[in-house]
Amino acid sequence: MTERFDAIVVGSGAGGGVVAGELAERGRSVLLLEAGPHHSAADHMRWEARANHEIWFPVAFAEPPAPDQPPVPLFRGRCVGGTTTVNTKVAVRPDAEDYSKWYAAAGLLGRDGEPFAEDDLLPYLERVEQRLGVRPRTDWQRCVTAVEPGFEAIGAKLAPVMSYTDPNCMRCGSCMQGCPTNAGKSTLNTYIQPAVVFGGLELRAGCEVRRVLIEDGAGRPQATGVEYLGPGGDLQQALADVVVVATGALATPGVLLRSGVREIAGGSPSSRLLGRNLGFHAARLIAGLFDERMDAHMVYPISSHCKQWQRDADGGFLVEAATVQDPIGFATGLCDEQGLPMWGQALVEVTRRYRHISSLLTMVNDENTGVVWVDEDGRDRYSYGWNEREQQRLDASLDTARRILEAAGAKRVLPTGVVSTHVQGSCRMGSDPERSVVDANGESHDVMRLFVGDSSVIPRTLSVNPSLTIMALASRLAAHIDADERGYLGTGARMLTPA
């Protein structure tokens, strides 16, 4: 027997969790499939090695353009709630320049036929902010106040970040191992679990989707369901009126490519863009070693930021303060003043002074020059290749962070290499099929009833943390699917039909 739903959503992170939860709350029958395990706050604890193994994907790497250049580590959550379960809950709206870049990149238009702008997303940003209880984090601790004079010394100013954490946050520092008090508002505890209890959402964890089922219909290919491996490894199918793939910018292109979208579309311009234009929002942690204790591991990890250099003309990067990696990640990623990985006694001496570290996080506006592809063995692969402008921003952001920390009194300044946790753009959303994979509503240009609902659709990398934007776009997608302007959806009743 094969189950049938109004919608199947693949992936439960910032995109999929919102789409599935909101559709179920609207009375639609929804199956939510997640490859990772289902853990609640009762399972979370401050145990870095365990969390790395259980609720994070193994670190992936974007391959460099030349053998003498390092790969870029890529981090993402693998559990119900996705990366929203293990991120820092920063909620920042896009800048006007971000929207302009979206239109320039993919011709993205709003409902009035004008270039997509804040008015098109604002109702959904506000809706998500209200749902998450977004608030300013003004409760700065010593690790932040210690670096604030360094910003002021170079003519910059720190401001509180907006955060989706409720007042129960005790600043325990466990965000990246999962919040043990549910004060961190992941899609699991904000959208998914309420929909499971009150909306009839069908959640299945430990289920890996192999492909979207696509058939001919009404003269065009259309998605009819998915094929997936259940928790026991058995191959199963489920059917639906619409399918939403939301497995993240690193995994969604592979799902669509393995589903044969490019072949079915005859190599159309939009299908050839699958996996292209991957953006990284390239980041570094820059550690300042101080004489006094900072204890940056026992705080809300990111409570302030400086947007002075946010726009491209001003530098093209953002600086957040203050944070520190947990001990394993800290020791693994640390480099010396020359940018070479630290090891041996030098590393021992620095890690012994872990409590004296306060770090800045820099994030660079990149230009979506990365690629996702599936190799001959069926594995997802990634690559990057910074252009001259991107490299200049990377260098300028590191130099700025170094000057800030030195001005604040740091005795040593030690960076990590470039990493990414904010991948975006591998299935661009746009109104021009020649420059995008999905249309302005997130539906595939090539396959009817097939939608993408995650960071893949962002046409150009944001200049701010993308999680709020991803959730707002997902809320917008849920509203569009529920409105059913194209008559895709059935009655909402779940049915069993012969396989």
Image: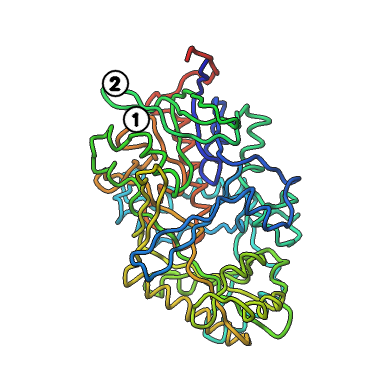
Residue 174 visible in image: yes
Q: Secondary structure at mark 2?
A: loop
Report the side of 262 relative to 316 (left or right).
left
Q: Amino acid at mark 1?
A: Met
Question: Along the polypeptide, which appears first: circle 2 or circle 1?
Answer: 2
Which residue is nearer to you in this view: 95 or 319?
Answer: 319
* Left or right, 296 with reference to 439: right
Q: Position of residue 304 (x, y in %)?
A: 61, 69
Coloring applied to the structure: rainbow
Q: Quadrant of residue 277?
A: bottom left
Q: Does residue 413 sit above or below 124 in this rendering?
A: below
Q: Which residue is mark 2?
A: 218
Q: How many numbered marks are there? A: 2
Identify which residue is drawn at 54% across, 32% down: 23
Residue 148 seen in this snapshot: no
Residue at the limit of the structure toward the top, as seen here: 498
When asked about the image quadrant of residue 271, the answer is: top left
Q: Position of residue 137 (x, y in %)?
A: 66, 64
Question: For the point 74% across and 51% down, which residue is it?
Answer: 180
* Residue 432 place in picture, x, y as percent: 27, 45
| Residue that numbered label 1 is attached to | 448
Secondary element at image label 1: loop
Give the image location of residue 282, x and y in percent.
45, 65
Q: Nearer the viewer, residue 355 or 107?
A: 355
